[in-house]
Image (tube, rainbow, N blue to C red):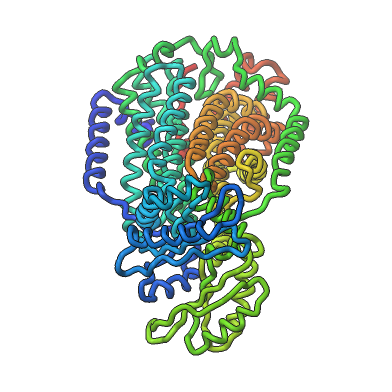
Amino acid sequence: MHTPLAKTAHTLTSKRGSWLFLGGVVVLVVLFFGLLSGAGEDRPNETAPADSESTQAQQTLDKFPEADKQSVMVVASNKDGSELSADDQAELKKLGTSLGDSVGDESTDPVTGPILSDDKQAALLMVPITVGMTNSDTAETVDDLRTAITDDPTASGLTDAGMSLLVTGGPAIGADIASAFNGADFTLLIVTIVIVALLLIITYRSPILWLLPLIVIGTADGLASTVTAAVGDWLDLQFDAGIISVLVFGAGANYALLFISRYREELRRIADHRTALAEAWTHTATTILASNLTVVLSLLSLVFAIIPGTRGLGITAAVGLLIAAAAVLFALPPVLAICGKKMFWPFIPKAEDTVTEPGSENSTTLAEAAKPSIWRTIATRVVRKPGLHLGAGIVILGVMATGFIGSSIGLDQTEKFRVQSESAQGLDVLADHFPPGESQPIWIVADTDHADDVVDSVSDMDGVVRASAIEDTNVDGTSVTKIMVTGEFEPDSAKGLDLVEDIRADVHAIDGANAQVGGAAATELDARDGNQTDFFTIVPMVLAISFIILLGILRAPIAAFTLLLVNVVSSAAAIGLGAFLSRTIFGQSALDAQVPILAFLFLVALGIDYSIFLAHRAKKESVLHGGRQGMIEAVAHTGGVITSAGIVLAGVFAALGMLPLMVLGQLGLIVGVGVLVDTIIVRTVIVPSIFGLVGDRMWWPNKSITHFHETVETGAAGGSIAGSAESEHDAHSTHLLAEKEFADSGSSSHHGRH
């Protein structure tokens, strides 16, 4: 019987079809590159929800005259901690005048300062600059300022005398974040390629074969980068291209490993490499599609996120993963078909004599039967004593979960850099000698008629150093006033965020003021609240999507629910372990606000991938061997490829540690460790032990598994299956029933290779 899958497989791998299909793929790729080249506009990185108070306040502030004029601070202090002398202050005044001439323009105010701290150990120069639409635009201006300081003779004299001059403040922080990524995406790409290449060479043990999937996946990554940039422009999305590249490489390598592993297996049974390749594609296409669909739909659930960067990442990453799956399913097979099995050199698989159980679609070589694999040995021991191994696995996950103890959510500005920046160092000096809120004031916009009431009310609050009205303007027919509030706490600290909430409660109670509170601290507060809202909105959707797909593939609700539950527990434990390692490696007791939702999403969605790889095979094997032995067979056949795929994916995510932001370092660490735990402990020990405890009932209501297992036991009681014609007939009949059940899940028809 020629199923649609079998026909597609034949087209992809035949002599003529492979060339035609590969040519069509090349034409499509070239067209996409040509049509979409140049896409990818710079957009501001909005961390708070679009409807949050801080965002609305910023939109009003942007309507003030010269809203693009902001000040950065040059923080001056003696490295030995001594007080600044009168001569030092005079030299700083001279430096301020010089900087105003070199980086200012006619539209900016002159440099203010030096402003001396109460302890006289530090001083500030307030330098007005014109900020760009994005941090990258502002970075050029900040770099010019730093270059001017370096080249200035007065500044050189001060630094030679032991003075530190650091540029900091809101615009400088944003500029440093943008500058930190200069060349970072290229570095990440190179590191990712090297990691994938090394792991593929180790896995395939071939100096040639690894190049084929790497070229295909690399092309897919380039295409995904181009297409997602165009999608981002079309839908005005914010997203991190580095994460998408990691996902494309990681998922693409996983799919390629699964496919080529099955291809190698088929070559040991089938001499013709094109036929073997077609068989491998037929058996793995459904699994790859189901795995890809799980991650893609999970990512698309982020369309309901209220944090702009999270929503944008979900949509574009889903597009990238669809391209990765398409590349492996439709570009890699023709390449392998054209190159032939010589690509496996020096370990070219050869068709060997096989032993096949009656009715089995899978045969085992005599060599494999004589020498059980390490995965078969492990699975056998686990299933024989499932309670002991399940208990041990639960203890390990429980210990990992204790990493949550002592952890919190949310990083302040200085903690968000993995490598200390000049602006972060400046903030530290500023906080030591000035009110910490000086660097990033709280901004309030209110109706002008009630502005004085707002200033008076806020000035009397605990934690407020001062509040003053700065400027009036007309916005949409209403006169509004901009009010600057300096707090005595670090803006992103718990007390600093509490102060924002207190100010909001205070000004909202003033009738007619229509006050909105914004600024960096308010934005951070709204961002944390938004990420928390996203977590509790998206997580149930991801779990529902994963369960529906598992249920659709396995058609066994108990098995689907069990696998999902194990995956959730494993993901939570991995985040706990990641929090502990973040404290140990990065010295951070808190996780970035965006890490929990992204880490949970990736761990659950990618973990379901491995569940599908394992359980799909276990179901087929259980028809032939019963639930317990079926799981042993599944682990024996998939243990190697799942572990290899997990190591590749973990290595790829570890590459995120190359990027300068703590959020990416923490995300890469947690997902990388979580994937290793999932493949080594969960898929090898915990899942087999649960299936060993439950047995055939795990596959309810699939009667074919229970019926066949009962037939085998009955046959064994009255004599061996080989010696009982009636038992052979029952087993074969049950196999035919199973074939009908699996036909729609990509299983090929019975080939009669007995």
Quick check: 381 above or below 516? above
- Measured as percent of width and height from the top left, residue 14 is found at 29, 25
- Measured as percent of width and height from the top left, residue 36 is found at 25, 48
- Look at 57% across and 37% down and name the residue there: 611
Number of numbered discs on residues: 0
Residue 539 visible (yes or no)? no
- Measured as percent of width and height from the top left, residue 445 is found at 49, 78
Residue 665 visible (yes or no)? yes
- Look at 23% across and 39% down and name the residue there: 30
- Look at 72% across and 34% down and name the residue there: 393
Q: In this rendering, would 249 be left or right of 427?
A: left
Q: To which quarter of the image does residue 673 belong?
A: top right
Relative to the observer, which residue lies in front, 56 or 4? Answer: 56
- Look at 46% across and 10% down and name the residue there: 352
Quick check: 46 above or below 648? below
Q: To which quarter of the image does residue 692 belong?
A: top right
Name the quarter where the N terminus is drawn. Answer: top left
- Measured as percent of width and height from the top left, residue 508 is found at 58, 81
Relative to the observer, which residue lies in front, 287 or 86? Answer: 86
Q: In this rendering, would 326 be left or right of 553?
A: left
Q: Which residue is at the far front?
A: 87
Relative to the observer, which residue lies in front, 481 or 224? Answer: 481
Quick check: 454 above or below 662? below
Relative to the observer, which residue lies in front, 400 or 336? Answer: 400
